[in-house]
Structure formats: C-alpha cells, structure tokens
Amino acid sequence: NAKVIKTDINSSNGVIHVIDTVILPKN
C-alpha cells in the first residue's frame, strides 16, 4: 500500500501522503 501512496505523492500533495505513509506502519 505504501507504494501506491508514494505514487499519489507525485499526483497530489506529497506532504499529506508522506504523513499517511508514516502512520500506516505504526498501525
């Protein structure tokens, strides 16, 4: 799933997606 989020970084706001990527592993 992280790879999909990283792809979204290029399309959408990178900062928000990066934060989501950090939250997911913790969960």
Image (cartoon, helix red, strand yellow):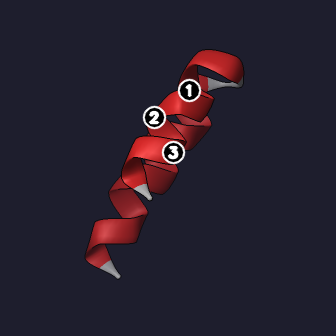
Q: Quadrant of the N terminus?
A: bottom left
Residue on which disc 1 sits: 9
Residues at discs 3 and 2 in contact (Cβ within 8 Å): yes
Say whether marks 1 and 2 touch (CB < 8 Å): yes
**Judging from the image, what secondary structure is the residue with disc 1 in?**
helix
Q: How many marks?
A: 3
The residue where tag 2 is placed is 6
Crowd band around label 1 with a 10 angstrom C-alpha radius: few (<14), some (14–19), many (20+): some
Residue 4 badge? 3
The residue sitting at 55% across, 41% down in the picture is 17
Amino acid at the residue labelled 2: Lys
Disc with the residue nearer the chain's start (1 vs 3)? 3
Could you tell me residue 9's position as x and y percent? Answer: 56, 26
Distance, label 3 to label 2, CA atoms, is 5 Å
Task: Kindly identify the residue that appears in the image at 53 percent across and 30 percent down.
Answer: 7
Closest to the observer: 11 or 13?
11
Q: Where is residue 21 shown, x and y percent of the image? A: 41, 52
Name the quarter where the C terminus is drawn: bottom left
- Dividing the picture into quadrants, the one containing residue 3 is top left
Which numbered circle lies on residue 17? none
Residue depicted at x 61% and y 32% = 8
